[in-house]
Amino acid sequence: MKLLRHLLPTILASTAVATVAAAAAAELHDDDNNSNIINDPLIQNFPDLVNWFTSHGGKIDPRITLGYEAQRHIRGMIATERIPRETVLIHTPASLMISSPEGGSHCDTIQRIVEELKLGKESKWEVYFKFDGSSNGSHVEDDDHNNGKEGHTRIPTQWKQHGQPGSRAIQELQYLPPTGDTHRHIEWYSSACDNDQELSNVQLQALMMFLTRAADRGIVPMYDLMNHHNGLINTRLAVDELGGLSVIASTDIEVNEPIYNTYARGGMESSVDVFNTYGFVEDYPQLWRWSDVDMKRLAEEDPNHAFQRYVNPNNNDDNAGGGDGVDANGVGFEPNSHHYEILVVSPTLAALHPTKALVHVLGNGRRSLSEWEEQIHNHHATLRQSFANAIHDSAQTILGELPTTIEEDETRILPNERRLYEKVKKKGRVDQGKADTIQAITYRLAFKKALQLAVDVAESEKFYVDTEEL
């Protein structure tokens, strides 16, 4: 397990927390959507939230509701009628946001949330807090066996820490990222905001709300109910002169089509970051990122080493280092990161070591599969074979050192864990520890598939071969 134990966290800013809104989504375990809508308190209480929102100056298009997405079976915003492009879907005035004073910090924003939660019914946001699942005490409950309660998906920072009883979820990551970094959010808050004190229940509630719902402007009600999808995003944002935030349809939105935001724009956050902050594996496209001691050493020896990955065969430039020139797609050579990366578009289509230009569309627009195929083909034509070999060898070594295979996880381990979870659930008891374990195994399976795809792509695609490599 030498390489696995030396995998390094790849968080771009160790104390930064996500600055985009998180999902209102909840996993749906019952195939009967109508039954779940009837029994789902968030969907039933959505009209009350809308009334509160509009009575305080907010605006939401009447063709928007909260329901279950037909294909993904998760809760989110959905169009009830066709909505034309450029329609203002939601407008949240600055007066409805919970944010820090100008020039304030994330700590100040969280403290404001704490203060409003303590006000209870006296808070202007009481209806919003009651509606918001992340402020529910059960999300920070320390009991792994919640009798009579529905299980919920937690973010890794809520899992039992390594070495504690019931810490199996972390073990099931099998040393894959974000191992060693799962509790960075609580550790950051305790260190930066609370003088390393033990967090109170209301502080935990406020932190969870901030992590999973906040935008860079703070808590933005109604905007934060949109789900994430970097492949099907159909909205953009605009800030008005008074500090209000508008959500605008970037495409025509058809009836029953989900309304999507992004939690990971432009390739800054990877699928590892999305999972570590929000607790789910995002749909395609996915951006998987990892590093190891060799990559760290290379970065220390040459901070610009990643620029050497690319060449420009169109002008016989044998050294695109420094980002000069353009690639075959007509854009720049700047690497998206200095880590190992694979941009996974489908189970069989992926780009190794993508450039910033290639991933910029994530959260900013859409590409068809044929467009992705062309872009990736052109990208690989400018990627040096030696760097494709390096990511191949890293991914293959990791897969070889993992204690279980993709096939074992997919056909035996994960189905068995789900069966045991449902067996206990039928007896009226929800095993939260088991739910966390299933969450970890689901994530590691997706990561392993990305690693295997990196191996396959490196072996099957054509890359740029330097003369010294011949």
Image (spheres, grey):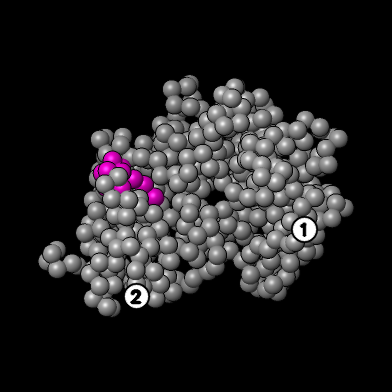
Q: Is residue 234 visible?
A: yes
Q: Secondary structure at mark 1?
A: loop
Q: Magenta region's main secondary structure?
A: helix
Between residue 329 and residue 177, name the one nearer to us: 329
How many dots with numbers? 2
Q: Position of residue 268 (x, y in %)?
A: 48, 54
- Residue type at mark 1 is Leu
Residue 64 picture quarter = bottom right
Separation of marks 2 and 1 at Cα, in angstroms: 43 Å
* Residue identifier under label 2: 328
Magenta highlight range? 289-299
* Residue identifier under label 1: 242
Q: Position of residue 383 (x, y in %)?
A: 28, 65
Q: Residue at x 44, y 26 (%)?
A: 162
Residue extending farthest front: 103
User: On the rendered structure, is 17 left or right of 400?
Assistant: right
Residue 347 picture quarter = bottom left
User: On the rendered structure, is 366 left or right of 407?
Assistant: right
Q: Position of residue 163 (x, y in %)?
A: 43, 22
